[in-house]
Image: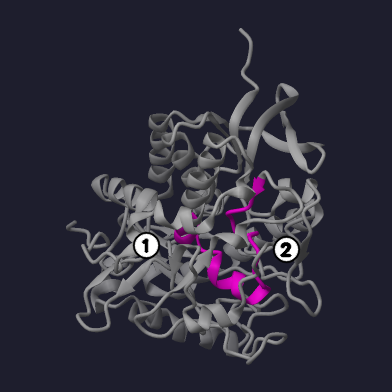
Amino acid sequence: MLKENKYDIIVCGGGPSGVAAAIAAARRGAKTLLIERYGFCGGMSTSALVNPWSGQEYVDPETNKRGSLIEGVFKEVVLKMHTNGGFGTSLAPSAFDEELLKYIYDTLLSDAGVHVRYHSYVQSVQKEGDRIASIGIASKEGIEVFCAQNFIDCTGDADVAAMAGVPFEVGRQEDGLTQAMTVSFRMGNVDKEDMIATGNFRAARALVEPYFQKALSKGELHYPYRNFIHFYDYPRPNILHFNMTRITEVSGLSAIDLTKAEIEGRRQAFLIGNWLIKSTPWFKNAYIEKIACQVGVRETRHIKGLYTITSEDIIKGQKFTDGIARSRYFIDIHNPTGAIDIQQIPGEKGAVKPNFGPPPGDYYEIPFRSLLNNVCPNVIVPCRALSATHEAAAAIRVMATMHAIGEAAGIAVAESVRQNTDVLSISGEWVRKQIPYLSKSPDLDKIWNSNA
């Protein structure tokens, strides 16, 4: 049986943006291949256990009604997660079960007619003139070549775009360092019922914080990686999710650094997990239930696109005529060099605090131009590697937003196939018009409510 190797569109990377892009493109009739190096989709949300989703939550400042800035594929995923009991808790409305998410992504991709290749890694790019003609894929079957009219780079690191010669920058302007990495983990058999009796998750954390600070001050615990306790609720009984480890001055573009980060992250996970079991009443019968199979990488390359998003765009809640996604996630910079997050952002007009975001009740938009480049016209980059400064990318990078950006890219690339042209030729204003919810106020149908 001959294998297919010619497609209208090839999506490289099965994270939230890649899944949404592939579904959107296939639904519009494009023959679409999704390539993913793991045996499942989800990217950081599944392989790195990054949890919960953020940036989509919206509270109407006049009515206090809660809703979402994002609909489309993302809303489909959320509602399916709700139906199956794997999304949201009373204290963490956007927490999710990543194992259920893998299955839902599989189902949506299959229903849309997307061809999926797991356990496959983009190894090379072949160009004809300024366009990508094909890519080489490494797998158990060796090196295979796949051709397409247009390519969607959802690798998170702009791997395909970089191999195609698209210019990029890495990390912050002054020294090229990227945000710290994290190995996420979960603890099971926690006395969660007692902890959440406060009815407030910040209060639940506050129960543990004095134990942590006392242990640090008395020298009983050496933990210079985080200066406070950081965990979230999880939508299953007696399990908590920890975003507590931090690995600094490592590059997500280096196999040596990634190896170091994996080992160090697991060491930190067991260090803090064992301390919690030994020293706090809520964890005395607990255990480390799961550690992410991949370190969480927050930042690597940023392509030089047709528009570079800045911190000013985030802070002002900037809107664009070609805005194709909304978010209100703040500038969340995990210090590249230490435990205490940066208090000022250098290098951009008007230094701001790292947790600065759009005004209350407002949001910013991501312009379509930030996904495009003027070097290789048939590749689009709708992932965290889009064109943004180090500071702005710290806000845009979150996974709910990535669903929306990816879906818009899939719509645009499918249209380029229909017109027999490159994605660079597609108008961002046209793409925006294809996304109905962007023409109205944020959805307030309470889809985050567990009773939805």
Q: Is residue 195 left or right of residue 253?
A: left
Q: Is residue 397 left or right of residue 225?
A: left
In terms of depth relative to the viewer, which is nearer, 62 or 306? 306
Mark 2 is on which residue type? Lys
The answer to whether residue 419 is above or below residue 308 is: above
Q: Which residue is mark 2?
A: 304
**Which mark is drawn over residue 167?**
none
Disc 1 is placed on an element classified as helix
Color encoding of the figure:
one colour
Q: Is residue 5 left or right of residue 272?
A: right
Marks 2 and 1 sit apart, C-alpha to C-alpha, by 26 Å
Residue at horizontal 43 percent and vertical 49 percent from the top = 98
- Residue 392 colored magenta? yes
Mark 1 is on which residue type? Leu
Determine which quarter of the picture holds residue 432: bottom left
Who comes first in sequence, dot 2 or dot 1?
A: 2
Bin the neighbour count of mark 1 within 10 Å (Cα to Cα): few under 14, some 14-19, many 20 and up.
some
Quadrant holding the N terminus: top right
Q: Which residue is mark 1?
A: 438
Where is residue 354 drawn, in percent x and y?
57, 83
Where is residue 264 drawn, in percent x and y?
70, 62
Answer whether residue 94 is visible to the viewer in this image. no
In terms of depth relative to the viewer, which is nearer, 193 or 12? 12
- Residue 384 colored magenta? yes
Disc 2 is placed on an element classified as loop
Q: Is residue 242 left or right of residue 135?
A: left
In terms of depth relative to the viewer, which is nearer, 306 or 262? 306
Quadrant holding the C terminus: bottom left
> Magenta part of the protein: which range?
379-402
Residue at horizontal 69 percent and vertical 37 percent from the top = 121
Where is residue 124 drawn, in percent x and y?
79, 37
